[in-house]
Image (cartoon, rainbow, N blue to C red):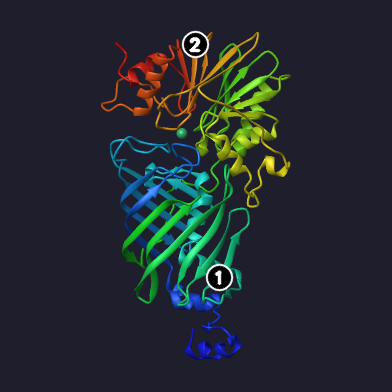
Amino acid sequence: MTLSRHLLAIPVLVGLANPVCAATVADIAAAMGSVNVSTLRISGTGTFAIVGQSLRAGGEWPKFRIKQAERVFDYANSALAEDIVFLPPEGAPRGGGGQPFYTEQRRLNTMRGDAAWTGAGENATAAPAQIAALQHELWISPHGVIKAALNAGTTASTGADGRTTFVVERAGRFKAQATANAANLIERVVSSIANPVLGDMTVETTYADYRTVEGVQVPTKIVQRVLGHPTFEMAVVDINLNAPPVTAPAQIRPAAPVPAATIEKVAEGVWFVAGASHHSAAIEMADHIVLVEAPLGDARTNEVIDLVKKTIPNKPLRIVVNTHHHFDHSGGLRAAAAEGMTILTHEFNRPFFEAAYAAPRTLAPDRLARANGNARFQTMGDKMVLSDSTRTLELLALKDNTHADGLIVGYLPKEKILIVADAFSPRTEVVRTPERLNPFTTNLWDNIQRLKLDVATVLPIHGRYVPVRELRIEVGQNN
Ligand SMILES: [Zn+2]
């Protein structure tokens, strides 16, 4: 803002100890140099955490040291590219999210318009589920939130402390309130984004230690938190205002269709309901069906429910077993509840889910919210047996598995089938023992021995269902 505006503002505010100057979004844009920003690349180091993948429900997200992080904001093309290389945990892995155990891991996530993908070039694969999160990331960045506000003609308001706030939103996707300090630099954005478990999930991002590059203000300290736990902390080292625009690989098209779920009989009354990435199992009892796992979110779980109802008509779906609280495994529980199923989960998880379900769901109301319904819970500790004249399903909590506290496996003693999430995910045929064993899988094997389970087939939530031989090979017990 100009000096004269500043002086003119003072008489209006007589009576305040520290006269403040009301700023508009245009003033903030001018102070930040936003009009001169078309693309911006920042890189540096920090920490990164995987939301929804804590060891214990409600606990800290698994956090990793970033070796190198880069973000390219391409505002003109509504595009964002994120490239993070992070180090494995120093001790035992705690929690999930496909974290690395022994070597560094690189995650490349990119979005342009209504397309998102992971990886780069020929190896890029469509990732439509990432679009909302990446759009959110782009438009809550300091220059993004200003550009969005300028576009929308947003009005700002300045408080007695000299801070100015304004709100931007994209219907169905996100809502953000930005705060600029008295120098008109964006210092904080509190936003919400739709999450299948948390509803309108609040993200708090702070921007500090601004550096001026070619008249543009760029924060060099970024801290992001979800439910109070840090999810991203970055110390920016390099800033480039002339980064090339983000382009999509040839094979990536907007709105790539999600493959449909399929259903297959594994044994009498035992059904494998396969999705592209996450599966479920349907167990037929005498007069009802037990669904094991309601993954991802409303869309996938409603599809699974429809498929099971069509395949096994005349028996109601009464219970949904939640193997663990990780968001990709629990995101469809509310859809199952809307279908009338009782959620059966470990007792560790119930308080977390109940608190999460109490949050508002205004951004993308799911089936349960639209029906104004409530979720019914039933909990278990170490063991619960569901049994009738037809079938017995034992639910057993793995002991000391550091993927998730209270990770539940399903065991059908008569059919000798073990239903497992995340502790063993045979996506391709296991033909040799890996050089370094997966600690989640060795723990599963220890639990199978401890519980004296007689397993012939493993039915995983990720991957293919396989003879137990593949699990034996995976843990080096095939002799
Ligand atoms: Zn998990």
Whether residue 244 can be seen here: no
Name the spot of residue 151 as percent of width and height, x first: 57, 69
For residue 90, which quarter of the picture?
Answer: top left
Whether residue 401 can be seen here: yes
Is residue 218 found left or right of 200 in the rendered image?
left
Q: What residue type is labelled 2?
A: Lys
Q: Residues within 10 Å of mark 1 (few under 14, many from 20)?
A: many
Name the spot of residue 214 as percent of width and height, x first: 35, 75
For residue 275, which quarter of the picture?
Answer: top right
Of badges 1 and 2, nearer the viewer stands 1
* Vertical position of residue 383 compared to residue 250: above or below: above
Residues at marks 1 and 2 touching, judged by CB atoms closer than 8 Å: no
What residue is shown at x 32% (from left), y 46% (from top)? 86
Name the spot of residue 65 as percent of width and height, x first: 32, 48
Q: How crowded is mark 2: few (under 14 residues within 10 Å), some or many (20 or more)?
A: some
Q: What residue type is labelled 1?
A: Thr
Identify the mark at residue 165; answer none if there is no mark: 1
SS under mark 2:
loop
What residue is shown at x 38% (from left), y 55% (from top)? 233
Give the labeled residue for mark 2: 416
* Vertical position of residue 241 compared to residue 370: above or below: below
Of residues 282 and 264, the one nearer the viewer is: 282
Q: Determine the CA span between mark 1 and mark 2.
A: 60 Å
Mark earlier in primary sequence (1, 2): 1
What residue is shown at x 30% (from left), y 44% (from top)? 87
